[in-house]
């Protein structure tokens, strides 16, 4: 099973967007997701960049969220305070969650979440590619994905699917073997 930590160079995010064309720069990913988790190290780096204290950064730009284990974490306020006219004002220093979009990795549980399906063009193309891959490689699993999709409601944030990294890794490995 794949294991990730925040220092890994991963084959997700920007690389996935390149695989499916350029980002349309619609900014929807910055506006509609309610939780954009960030790491303490990112808070330290960005507060230094902005020349403010970590406490000031937290007060201005973050909110407290609780995960399923009721562990308290930090998330950027949404819409993202660094989005301006569909552009990221700190793009070169953007957060891990932004770098890996449309895949979000929970580094604690080794879960991957594909967000923004039917909202973000690239997330939708990735999902459709995932379906097509499993349709050819593992039809039973393809049917399970379709069945799950029918049980999920699509809202203004699009649809998301999640699972262990092994759900996505065969498809990602296949994608990058084509290069």
Image (tube, rainbow, N blue to C red):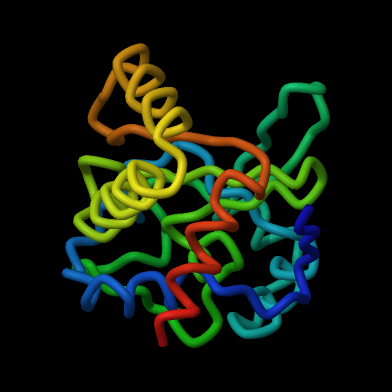
**Left or right side of 101 for 173:** right
**Left or right side of 89 for 162:** right
Position of 147 relative to 74 (above/below): above
Instruction: Give the total number of marks visible in the rendering.
Output: 0
Quadrant of the image occupied by residue 45: bottom right
Viewer-closest of 156 and 17: 17
Residue 158 in percent (x, y) is at 28, 35
**Left or right side of 134 for 84:** left
Viewer-closest of 88 and 47: 88
Viewer-closest of 118 and 133: 133
Residue sitting at x 55%, y 82%: 93
Residue 34 in percent (x, y) is at 45, 37
Residue 71 in percent (x, y) is at 82, 30
Viewer-closest of 63 and 176: 176
Residue sitting at x 35%, y 55%: 30
Residue 8 in percent (x, y) is at 74, 75
Give the position of the C terminus as an image quadrant.
bottom left
Position of 133 relative to 23 (above/below): above
Quadrant of the image occupied by residue 2: bottom right
Residue sitting at x 79%, y 33%: 72
Give the residue at the far top of this rendering. 151
């Amino acid at each position: 099973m794949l294991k990730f930590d925040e220092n890994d160079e991963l084959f997700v995010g920007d690389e996935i967007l390149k695989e499916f064309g350029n980002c349309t720069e619609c900014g929807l990913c910055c506006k509609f997701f309610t939780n954009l988790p960030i790491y303490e190290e990112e808070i330290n780096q960005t507060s230094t960049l902005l020349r403010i204290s970590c406490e000031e950064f937290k007060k201005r730009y973050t909110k407290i969220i609780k995960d399923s284990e009721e562990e308290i974490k930090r998330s950027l306020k949404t819409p993202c305070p660094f989005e301006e006219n569909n552009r990221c004002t700190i793009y070169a220093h953007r957060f891990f969650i932004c770098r890996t979009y449309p895949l979000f990795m929970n580094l604690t549980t080794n879960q991957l979440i594909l967000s923004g399906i039917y909202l973000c063009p690239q997330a939708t193309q990735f999902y459709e590619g995932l379906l097509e891959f499993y349709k050819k490689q593992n039809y039973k699993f393809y049917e399970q994905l379709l069945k799950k999709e029918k049980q999920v409601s699509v809202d203004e944030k699009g649809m998301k699917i999640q699972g262990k990294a092994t759900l996505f890794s065969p498809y990602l490995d296949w994608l990058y073997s084509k290069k």
